[in-house]
Image (cartoon, rainbow, N blue to C red):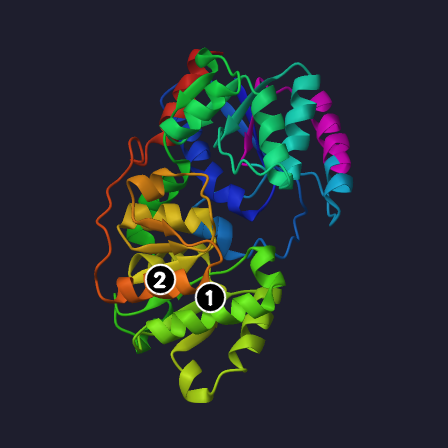
Amino acid sequence: MNICIVAGARPNFIKVAPIVRAVENARAHGRDVSYTLVYAGSKDDPTLEPSLFQDLQLAPPQVYLNVVCENLNELTGQVMGAFERYLQENKSDVVIVVDDLASTMAAAIVTKKQGIRLAHLVAGTRSFDIKMPKEINRLVIDGLSDLLFTAGMGASSIAAREGAELSKIYMVGNILLDTLRFNLNRLKKPAFMEAYKEHEYMVFTLNRKALLADRVNLYRMIRAMMRNAGGMPIIAPLRGKVAEVVKEILEEFPKPQRQAFTLVPSLGYLEFGWLTAHACGIITDSGNVAEEATFNGVPCITLNSYTEHIETVKVGTNELVGEDAELLGQMVAKLVRGQWKTGKLPDRWDGRTAERIVQILMEGK
């Protein structure tokens, strides 16, 4: 049995690494299974820092589709063409696609047109905002999938309500945490952290284009963070355009006011994992970061009005503030005072998701 695993962007590798390990482990125990890792992008993709595969203990992809394109519709078409050629020349028994990218949707469509079994990793996630391109991708991928691997009951219920047969839905847990658990003892303390005390700083990450686009409100949010942090350092590992925008906004504040806010270059997986695991709290717009915060028991404020994994709010350490600067300030103050709720691990967020997935695939071959 050959499993084709498709990664469309850097974050996908963090989620597929455990599946590769689970396949290799099954093979080492005499099971007839192998894998091919396919990347939609190119070998020299600048977002794939040299340390990524080393940090994840993952071999680089065997296949690169070499699609490099900014326009999502053009990207979809190019990935479909390149992946169709790959599948026609290489036997695959099942294709696993991850998350909700345009490249993920493209690979899903081609897989079904080729009559190959399709599995969707992190299925059933919804924002219920059809204006979001990723929401359309999710609906298409889930609708086409033969196997829907979900992270929790909420996602499983959504998939069922939308018409997926119950026999196709498997609540396997959160694959992201397989990677985190595997690497807990390998996390690396960044060199600059010698100047800070553990659990006496906050981490700030930013990525959403909507937040960057509204400079006025982003200024208000950063001001609310600094005003309510009580002097606690805020460390922000940011890259590219995001770093430029935040730096420009910080320069609008008096120097004494912005001293507690430290911009640092973006970090590799192991260093970023250490930074967030030892923080007093996290302010982010990333669902992945919020999920890891729940695993680590670290208070997390999410700059969004929804989360794909509501378990992080209902059970974990996460709270949603949307783009409300005043509410953000209140939550930061609450966090600094040590008045945060106590979270626990959602069901099956135990670091064994990949084992379940490979077992299901092998049973259905």
Q: Is residue 301 left or right of residue 216?
A: left
Bounds of the magenta span? 77-99
Identify the residue at image location x=47%, y=19%: 160
Tell me residue 219's x, y (percent): 52, 71
Amino acid residing under circle 1: Pro
Residue under label 2, please give it: 275
Q: Do the residues bearing badges 2 and 1 touch, measured as CB atoms within 8 Å?
A: yes
Classify mark 1: helix, strand or loop. Answer: strand
Q: Is residue 216 left or right of residue 25?
A: right
Q: Which numbered marker is on residue 4? A: none
For the image, the number of numbered tags is 2
Say which quarter of the image contains residue 176.
top left
Q: Is residue 241 left or right of residue 333?
A: right
Say which quarter of the image contains residue 310.
top left
Dot 2 or dot 1: first in sequence order is 1
Image height of 204 relative to 129, above or below: below
Residue under label 1, please give it: 237
Task: Give how far apart the Cα atoms at labels 2 and 1 are.
Answer: 10 Å
Q: Magenta stretch: residue 78 in it?
A: yes
Tell me residue 362's x, y (percent): 44, 16
Say which quarter of the image contains residue 19.
top left
Q: Magenta stretch: residue 271 in it?
A: no
